[in-house]
Amino acid sequence: MSRVLEGLEPQKVFYYFEELSRIPRPSYHEKAISDYLADFAKERGLEYYQDDLYNIIIIKEATAGYEDAAPVIFQGHMDMVCEKEAGCKKDMEKEGVDLAAEGDFVFAKGTTLGGDDGIALAMGLAILDSDHLPHPRLEAVFTVSEEVGMEGASGIDVSMLRGRRLLNLDSEEEGVFLAGCAGGAVATVTLPKNTRPRKEESVFRISAEGLRGGHSGTEIHKGRVNANILMARLLSEVYKKTPFSLIRVSGGAKDNAIAREAEALLACDRPSEIFSLLQQTAAALIKEYRPLEQEISLTAERWDGSLPEEILTRETTEAYLKLLCDMPHGVIAMCKGQDDLVETSLNLGVVTDQKEDVCLSYCVRSSVDRAFDELIGTMKETAERCGASVSVRGRYPAWEFAEVSPLRQMMLDVYREMFQKEAVVNVMHAGVECGQLAQKLPGMDAVSFGPDLFDIHTPKERMSISSVQRTYAFLLELLKRAR
């Protein structure tokens, strides 16, 4: 079988990255990738533990001369955010991604790449597969369902781990060492649907497309337009002037990705007026957001496709639009004394039209527990005013910054020696699993780092080849010095 990444250095890292890319691994569908990792361990006679969630821990004993060194935990997650371009026919629950390489970048054709966090797995396997790289006892922890609330890290048993030094490979900016992050959860807002029989009415399909999207943690402050919110603004403005009934609404793919696309069908008895208002409002919104979203598209067209017999009443339509327009979204607060870091935010990632309800899935994040609780309280109050309810699941803790970290200091020293420049120590608004694992392993000293990845959680995701090379060399040097 021909290999797209053959010849790229480091060869073993890119070999395993391509192997992993052939295995579909959306959240909640990690059995195949977990079994691959288990087989990898069995074939090499390595100690491993695979749980009912499909988390897996692989242990490799220290090489000669490192027997007395403290163990090192190496950690990443198996699942990836599966987004694809409009028109892409790939079934990402059943098919791997189609890799490509051009210049300094590896990417996937029409879909997310899965560098977040496939590159961690690939580096880990390359090290575990080696017979000559020096290292202390390695405890590789590969988790599931990170992208949907860190459920794997929450449920994993780590009682067999001896290490208290953790290298998390789930960051996307080379030379930036993450030492703290926000906590968060998924909040689902459910609006019951009241319906009426569909009459002989004109039907329009409205679509929002061409938006950049992005990661709802690291890019929530960049002003990128959320397709679900954009759709709500458009429909709300039109409804104020000429009411209509929604037939169905949908948008987004993942709660932790800024929605790139949304769609709605509406029924009305004044089609000429509605169509004119839709065009005028869409043009105004496009003009407003064009500086931020060069490829923004808002279109309305007559719909002649299949339709349900029951559609939303105007009362439910109005409640839905009020709910989306009144609910807070985006950045809620910046960190006090640190104007470039988001403290609290929420992202409406997915709108789904179900048989009896419309469900809105939000990713809620905050580095301050009180602020998180207050935001959930505000969401519940807003929802209740519109006849909806809020449920919260998968809450994970913030990872608090440690003033003293011997591991971090060693990494700073090694980075300076290798690259003749200073690394940056940072905390970020997106979540990593260090907070979950720190609760399970008291006294843990952790740092998260990784190679340059761009536009993660979108089909434009790409990974720098040269950055992978430098990051892997840095990782090997860390293990060499971890006596």
Image (spheres, helix red, strand yellow):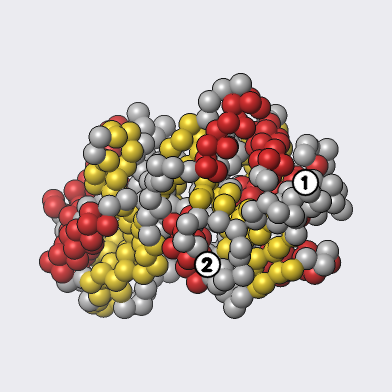
Q: Residue furthest right?
A: 1
Residue 247, horizontal then vertical, whole percent: 31, 67
Q: Residue at x 37, y 65 (%)?
A: 395
| Residue 153: x %, y % from top left | 51, 65
Please give the name of the residue rendered at 58% of the width and 49% of the height, measured from the top-left corner. 167
Badge 2 element: helix
Mark sitting on residue 134: 1
Give coordinates of residue 398: x percent, y percent: 37, 55
Of 438 and 302, the residue lying toward us: 438
* Amino acid type, callout 1: Pro
Local crowd size for mark 2, using a 10 Å CA cut-off: few (<14), some (14–19), many (≥20) = many
The answer to whether 220 is drawn above or below residue 325 in the figure is: above
Compared to 105, does 241 lie above or below? below
Sequence-first disc among 2 and 1: 1
Instruction: Tell me the kind of residue under disc 2.
Output: Gly
Which sits in the foreground, 190 or 161? 161
